[in-house]
Image: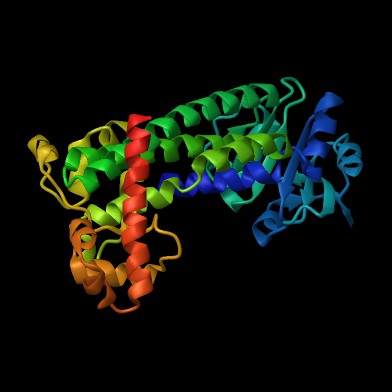
């Protein structure tokens, strides 16, 4: 959970200094001029306590102003929303008791200020020509945009492959569900593949956060490849998890638990089976299981979720819903004769579509 919070903080910080923001333009100006700089975001009481000297600016932020003020020694203090330059040439005196791995005075000060105040501190190295950001215990060196773009494109290619495999295992599971032949292996394989896609997406999100406006095309590709992935995963869990009815666990909480595992754990299908509430032995994967029917029923157009809930609670499983007569379906709350016929037609049509995909 702590790692997840740290990742959220990092993405938030990266977006605030990404290309396309005025702050990044100012930082790049300082870099290009081969100058150094120390910038603190936010004039909280904690920052005020360790600030000495300097002068008040209290002017609207512009990249040119930041560049000019960075020519002086000392830190520049910006407002929390980075829309104002509040002070410049400020000497910061953080506690010397705070450990720092940095060797340069500017970077050591930035790290200690970030740890002591929790504010975002940005250090620009005059000698190395790099921008380092600090927030709390977080430290991150901004990378060359060309390198990040290359990595992002490689990750998109990986995502395309993972999505193609996920689509295949979903089709296989759907066919097996109609044939009443699905095993726990088929179910856990889908959940594993969903998680693999979501993990690549997290990696791409870090790249796009750092790329800012330069990553728009990557973001569009990612969103297209991500369409319905998490929803499908949640519906599979809702169909098969044995622990959902007790009110303690939801499909989202189960997927979140699997998402927090190290890579070697989610590659073990028996552990995913255990997360669904089944015994954790390897032989359990051969067990035949019946879906409740949420995922397949979602494929039927204009079928509201409350009606799907009523169908599942009335019949209990997909195969009973499939074999129910028009009259039996008609008796379920929220389903008239017209909707009962459209459910029958929708299920048959989807089944035929799956068979065509398998033989196509």
Can residue 252 be seen in the rendering of this structure? no
- Relative horizontal placement of residue 210, taking residue 315 as reference (left or right): right
Residue at 69%, 46% (x, y): give it.
16
Question: Is the residue 211 above or below the residue 130 in the image?
Answer: below
The structure's colour scheme is rainbow
The answer to whether residue 334 is above or below residue 323 is below
Q: Is 16 or 119 nearer to us in this picture?
A: 16
Question: Percent position (x, y) of residue 209?
Answer: 63, 40
In front: 330, or 302?
330
Report x, y in % for residue 79.
77, 56
User: Which of the pair 114/172 is nearer the observer?
Assistant: 172
* Residue 256 x %, y %: 35, 51
> Would you identify the image quadrant in which residue 317 lies?
bottom left
On-image quarter of the C terminus:
top left
User: Which residue is located at x 31 percent, y 40 percent?
Assistant: 190
Measured from the top left, where is residue 312 in percent x and y?
A: 25, 66
- Please indicate, yes or no, whether residue 45 appears anywhere in the rendered image: yes
Side of 237 where 151 appears, left or right = right
Residue in view at x 91 percent, y 38 percent: 68
Q: Say left or right for 313 vs 40.
A: left
Quadrant assignment, res 165? top left
Residue in the foreground of this view, choosing between 259 and 133: 259
Residue sitting at 75 percent across and 43 percent down? Answer: 39
Figure disc tally = 0
- Left or right: 107 in relation to 244: right
């Amino acid at each position: 959970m702590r790692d997840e919070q740290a990742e959220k903080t990092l993405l938030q910080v990266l977006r605030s200094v990404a290309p396309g923001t005025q702050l990044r333009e100012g930082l790049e100006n300082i870099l290009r001029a081969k100058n150094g700089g120390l910038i603190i975001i936010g004039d909280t009481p904690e920052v005020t306590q360790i600030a000495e000297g300097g002068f008040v600016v209290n002017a609207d932020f512009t990249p040119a102003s930041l560049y000019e003020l960075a020519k002086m020694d000392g830190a520049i203090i910006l407002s929390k929303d980075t829309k104002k330059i509040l002070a410049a040439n400020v000497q910061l005196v953080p506690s010397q008791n705070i450990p720092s791995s940095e060797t340069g005075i500017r970077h050591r000060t930035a790290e200690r200020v970030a740890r002591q105040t929790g504010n975002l501190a940005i250090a620009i190295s005059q000698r190395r020509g790099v921008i380092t950001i600090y927030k709390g215990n977080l430290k991150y060196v901004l990378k060359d945009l060309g390198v990040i773009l290359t990595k992002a494109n490689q990750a998109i290619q990986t995502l395309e492959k993972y999505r193609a495999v996920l689509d295949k295992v979903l089709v296989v599971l759907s066919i097996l569900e109609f044939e009443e032949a699905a095993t726990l292996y088929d179910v856990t394989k889908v959940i594993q593949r969903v998680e693999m896609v979501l993990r690549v997406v997290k990696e791409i999100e870090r790249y796009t956060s750092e790329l800012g406006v330069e990553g728009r095309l990557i973001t569009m590709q990612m969103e297209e490849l991500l369409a319905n992935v998490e929803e499908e995963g949640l519906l599979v869990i809702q169909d098969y998890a044995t622990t959902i009815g007790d009110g303690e666990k939801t499909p989202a909480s189960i997927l979140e638990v699997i998402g927090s595992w190290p890579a070697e754990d989610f590659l073990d299908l028996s552990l995913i089976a255990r997360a669904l509430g089944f015994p954790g032995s390897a032989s359990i994967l051969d067990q035949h299981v019946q879906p409740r029917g949420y995922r397949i029923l979602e494929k039927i157009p204009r079928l509201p979720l409350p009606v799907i809930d009523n169908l599942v609670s009335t019949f209990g499983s997909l195969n009973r819903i499939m074999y129910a007569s028009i009259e039996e379906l008609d008796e379920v709350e929220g389903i008239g004769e017209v909707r009962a016929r459209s459910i029958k037609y929708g299920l048959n049509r989807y089944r035929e579509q799956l068979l065509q995909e398998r033989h196509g």
